[in-house]
Image (spheres, rainbow, N blue to C red):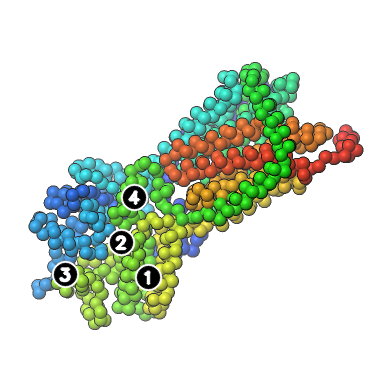
């Protein structure tokens, strides 16, 4: 290759590497629940309008502190009350509430007064205080655990907090809690999720990059056994990843929950391209060609096939842009660009460097070469002699796979998306068991006609729905404007717990309405809209699974429709929990739609490349087979299909088709030389077969790197992609030869002669 061309390319990549290094350091991480909302969904539009009248349902932080002997201890309660007051003064905290601040309103002959829920300075009254508190539906599971061993400080945060604000809140809370001697404490809330999950993302990227890098280094060592060959391969892969990360930085993209896959993806895709290019170049040099001839043949033959495989891989990733979930869409687009970055890095940088060296400098030949030739020869003879058995075996596996697919569920839980072995997961589990959990569920209430949301009939309807919600054990922390009127009724009845109900007649209710502004309203301002026409029932639902919660929701909707008067008030479920769970509904449809588009585009590319519909069929069969197997594994292993796991199919399809293209491209090239079908298959199996086996092994172990993840969905994705790509390898080696023999029978000798004469003319 011309020396000036080398200088230009080296200079270009040096500048790109320097710029990429700078912009890689500018990369930012982000985690917002809003990014997982299904954009374009009518429920999302409704929720966005709903919170304009009220406020978001996830702008809270819960801090639970424990005392195993019971919380009704004067020293413990004093510290806890001090914590409640001090937390209110922290930055980005707008309100704090706990049992030690709660008071009961009480009507006396001298006016309205209040008595504390806990008489902090009078331990002799703790037992009676405890009895009243545990019997009050507002407090048990909400501010105190049912076994009375934990108390919660409820903190309201500013809305739509950002990562730096979340860090500030959590750091200040940690520092504050260190000044007390509580046995243990637990957090739950948006700020906590943001801080911890971004920390997990950073850890995942670092670990996956290091482990994948070590893996590729070992593979290159055993493959080439020469320092120069290993250095060329590793520098090519590393440069491709650096340029990709620099691209993300310069375009201002933020790294989200899917970012941990980027290092693994770039390393193994780059490694696959490098191995195909270097193997071809070395094979051509061993035939006695000069460096210049070998590199141009490599670029012409393998470069074209690798370009097509890169495009098809990108198409597979681009199928994810049909998703309504932004992190999935961003991952698909970024990964598609990353694949092309890896390709152009290899085709420009790697080939230029390779052209400077000969075989002995790049690879150590020995028994390894003989091993591969012997192994691939055995594979060729096995497939040739067992074609019918292979086909029938494939049919049996296919039928079993459809059975597994029928068992797929989307009943995923939030806890399965949290990092294993980390405090955030243990805290989440603690609140699920002791308190109300995290998933918010709101019900919007719309007063109809001339009614106001505070009218007697509307409040009665709200209370009817509220009481029905209490029949579900998994729905807790239920609150609405009815609590204000129930509290007044209780105050007017000597604070008896049995009086915490709505008044039975309109006259009494209207009397309470006139008295309402004299009573502490608590959170009434967030339960009633400014215009008085809308109200809100808030609650939280335990993490029982998306499908289970959906069934409960539909049951609630039916009950409301049958037991409330739509002329008085209408009701509609909403909230962040509902929106996140709706992702499950879109996973299947967007997955099938995206894969359908990818299949159409890849089929078009196949037709343009091979110009033979028979080769199109041959190319698609072994690549649809692994996708069906992946679906079966989801069913048989009981893995819930959720947004993160759904990317398995796009990734597997995009990468798996690469080996098929390399295999069929080689068959076509050898066939063009006038070789028979059997000769084509044997030569392809011996030469290209070795490369696709090597790359598949690298892909398999590359994605298995994800097993080092502490993020369960990432481990699932790594395992499924690895197994799917390994099955794709066997699909190519086992199914393509029988399909070729069936659809591309041997041509007659006269036909072959005519084709040769035509080519020579």
**Mark 2: few/some/many CA within 10 Å (<14, 14-19, 20+):** many
**Mark 4: few/some/many CA within 10 Å (<14, 14-19, 20+):** some
Residue at (52, 30) in percent of width and height: 215
Q: Residue 485: image x %, image y %? A: 24, 72
Instruction: Let me know if residue 742 appears in the view.
Output: yes
Taking depth in this image into account, of 617 and 28 the one nearest to the observer is 617
Helix, strand or loop status at disc 2:
strand
Tags 1 and 3 touching, CB below 8 Å:
no
**Residue 145 falls left or right of residue 50:** left
**Residue 708 falls left or right of residue 484:** right
Q: Residue 171: image x %, image y %? A: 29, 42
* Of labels 1 and 3, the one closer to you: 3
- Label ID, residue 429: 4
- Label ID, residue 445: 1
- Label ID, residue 326: none
* Distance (Cα) linking label 2 and label 1: 18 Å
Mark 2 or mark 1, earlier in chain? 1
Mark 2 or mark 4, earlier in chain? 4
Residue at (15, 59) in percent of width and height: 118
**Residue 567 falls left or right of residue 294:** left
Helix, strand or loop status at disc 4:
helix
Residue at (63, 23) in percent of width and height: 368
Q: Which residue is mark 2?
A: 477
């Amino acid at each position: 290759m011309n020396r000036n061309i080398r200088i230009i390319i080296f200079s270009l990549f040096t500048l790109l590497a320097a710029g990429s290094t700078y912009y890689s350091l500018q990369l930012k991480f982000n985690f917002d629940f809003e990014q997982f909302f299904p954009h374009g969904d009518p429920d999302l539009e409704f929720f966005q309008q709903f919170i304009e009248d009220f406020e978001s349902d996830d702008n809270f932080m819960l801090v639970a502190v424990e005392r195993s002997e019971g919380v009704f201890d004067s020293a413990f309660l004093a510290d806890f009350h001090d914590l409640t007051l001090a937390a209110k003064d922290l930055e980005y905290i707008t309100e704090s509430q706990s049992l030690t601040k709660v008071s009961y309103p009480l009507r006396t002959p001298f006016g309205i007064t209040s008595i504390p829920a806990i008489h902090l300075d009078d331990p002799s009254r703790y037992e009676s205080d405890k009895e009243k508190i545990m019997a009050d539906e507002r407090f048990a599971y909400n501010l105190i655990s049912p076994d009375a061993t934990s108390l919660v400080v409820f903190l309201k945060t500013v809305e739509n907090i950002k990562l730096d604000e979340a860090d500030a809140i959590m750091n200040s809370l940690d520092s504050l809690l260190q000044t007390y001697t509580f046995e243990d404490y637990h957090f739950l809330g948006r700020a906590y999720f943001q801080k911890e999950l971004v920390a997990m993302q950073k850890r995942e990227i670092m670990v996956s990059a290091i482990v994948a890098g070590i893996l590729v280094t070992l593979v290159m060592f055993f493959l080439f056994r020469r320092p120069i060959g290993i250095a060329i391969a590793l520098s090519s892969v590393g440069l491709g990843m650096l340029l990709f990360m620099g691209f993300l930085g310069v375009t201002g993209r933020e790294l989200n929950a899917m970012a941990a896959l980027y290092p693994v993806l770039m390393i193994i895709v780059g490694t696959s391209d490098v191995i195909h290019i270097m193997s071809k170049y070395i094979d051509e040099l061993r035939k006695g060609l000069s460096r210049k001839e070998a590199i141009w043949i490599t670029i012409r033959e393998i470069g074209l096939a690798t370009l097509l495989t890169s495009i098809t891989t990108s198409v597979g990733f681009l199928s994810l842009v049909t998703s309504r979930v932004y992190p999935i869409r961003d991952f698909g687009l970024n990964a598609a660009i990353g694949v092309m970055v890896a390709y152009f890095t290899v085709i420009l940088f790697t080939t230029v460097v390779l052209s400077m060296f000969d075989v002995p400098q790049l690879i150590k030949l020995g028994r390894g070469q003989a091993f591969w030739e012997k192994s691939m020869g055995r594979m060729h003879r096995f497939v040739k002699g067992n074609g019918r058995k292979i086909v029938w075996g494939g049919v049996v596996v296919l039928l079993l796979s459809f059975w597994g697919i029928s068992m797929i569920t989307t009943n995923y839980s939030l806890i399965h998306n949290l990092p294993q072995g980390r405090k955030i997961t243990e805290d989440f589990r603690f609140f699920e068991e002791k308190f109300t959990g995290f998933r918010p569920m709101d019900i919007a209430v719309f007063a109809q006609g001339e009614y106001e949301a505070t009218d007697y009939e509307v409040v009665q309807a709200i209370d009817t729905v509220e009481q029905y919600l209490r029949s579900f054990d998994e729905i807790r922390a239920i609150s609405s404007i009815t609590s204000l009127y129930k509290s007044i009724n209780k105050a007017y009845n000597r604070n008896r717990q049995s009086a915490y109900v709505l008044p039975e007649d309109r006259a009494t209710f209207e009397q309470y309405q006139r008295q309402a502004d004299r009573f502490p309203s608590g959170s009434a301002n967030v339960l009633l809209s400014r215009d008085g026409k809308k109200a809100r029932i808030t609650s939280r639902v335990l993490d029982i699974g998306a499908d289970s919660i959906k069934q409960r929701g539909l049951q609630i909707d039916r009950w409301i429709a049958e037991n409330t008067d739509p002329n008085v008030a209408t009701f509609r479920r909403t909230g962040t929990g509902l929106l996140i769970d709706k992702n499950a509904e879109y996973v299947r449809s967007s997955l099938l739609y995206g894969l359908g588009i990818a299949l159409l585009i890849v089929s078009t590319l196949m037709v343009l490349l091979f110009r033979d519909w028979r080769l199109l069929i041959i190319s698609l069969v072994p690549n649809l087979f692994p996708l069906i197997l992946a679906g079966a594994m989801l069913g048989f292993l009981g893995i819930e299909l959720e947004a993160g796991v759904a990317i398995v199919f796009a990734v597997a399809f995009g990468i798996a088709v690469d080996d098929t293209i390399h295999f069929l491209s080689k068959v076509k090239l050898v066939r063009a030389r006038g070789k028979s079908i059997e000769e084509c298959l044997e030569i392809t199996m011996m030469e290209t077969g070795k490369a696709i086996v090597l790359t598949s092994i690298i892909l398999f172990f590359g994605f298995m790197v994800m097993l080092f993840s502490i993020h369960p969905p990432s481990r699932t994705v790594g395992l499924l992609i690895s197994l799917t790509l390994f099955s794709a390898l066997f699909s190519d080696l086992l199914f393509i030869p029988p399909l070729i023999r069936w659809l591309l029978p041997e041509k007659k000798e006269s036909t072959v002669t005519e084709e040769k004469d035509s080519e020579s003319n």
